[in-house]
Image: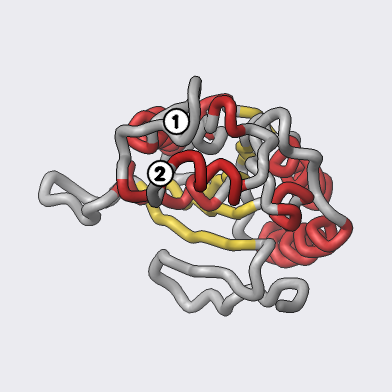
Amino acid sequence: MTLPTELIIARHGEAHCNREQIVGGLQGCRGLTDRGRRQIERLAQRLGQEHHERPIHAIYTTPLRRAQESAAIIGAYLSLDAETVADLAEQDYGAADGRPWTDVVVEYGDIPALDADRPLAAGGETWRDYLHRASVAIGEITTRHVGKRVLVLGHGETIDATFHHSWPCPSPFGPPRLSRRTMQASRPGCSNRSPGPDPPLVGDGP
């Protein structure tokens, strides 16, 4: 029987745009804070310890600076170069990029999460379109690394896209092709959504 791809989804460390509540697209993202770097260092150490017995074969990340910096730190620990996949980037918020979230939501006039077909701002991407492109990218990665262990260093939305790609699981048409595990480096703990006894990763404080 072919083993499923084990896909580890890790969220980037704390970024300046997170702390300042700025929409962090290509313009608004200024990379990791010092705290975010410490968080990723701790995650890298954990993955490095596992890597000896359960090697990670590839690292993928998004074009956004906070994800790139996080992937570079982890890649240095694992002696792997991260590959950037444009379609893994979080939802494109168009003209909202770089602006305060509070202002953008007020102008939107409603709760953005309630409408999957309405962009947050002019030139932006809908949630439904984001889920489609990102889940296709996840599917291509899992197909490329059947039976292997792969790290995707992305965003909170990357977790949603992964479940969108693989749920429901198992399928009546055969065994699951994907084993999922999620880690959130920039929060007090991690969410482990795949079977197994892995303990939670403690972050860099509340």
The residue at 58%/76% (across/down) is 200
Pointer 1 residue: 137
For label 2, the crowd category at 10 Å Cα-Cα, with few meaning under 14, some 14 to 19 and many 20 or more, is: many
For image coordinates 17% across by 50% down, the residue present is 171
Residue farthest to the left, as pictured: 172
Q: Secondary structure at mark 2?
A: helix
Q: Nearer the viewer, residue 8 or 97?
A: 97
Which is more toward the observer, 90 or 140? 90
Which of these two is toward me, 190 or 25? 25
Q: Distance between the Cα atoms at labels 2 and 1?
A: 9 Å
Percent across and percent down for residue 181 are 48, 60
Residue at (51%, 47%) from the top-left corner? 106
Left or right of residue 194, residue 55 in this image: right
Give the image location of residue 111, x and y in percent.
39, 51
**In terms of image quadrants, where is residue 44?**
bottom right
Does residue 36 appear anywhere in the picture? yes
Q: Is residue 87 above or below residue 104?
A: above
First in sequence: mark 2 or mark 1?
1
Residue 79 seen: no
Residue 133: where, in percent of width, then height? 40, 28
On the image, numbered disc 2 is attached to which residue? 161
Give the quadrant of the C terminus. Answer: bottom right
Judge the density around disc 1: few (<14), some (14-19), many (≥20) Cα neighbours within 10 Å: some
Report the residue at 61% width, 53% height from top: 11
Marker disc for residue 20: none
Q: What's the amino acid at mark 1?
A: Ala
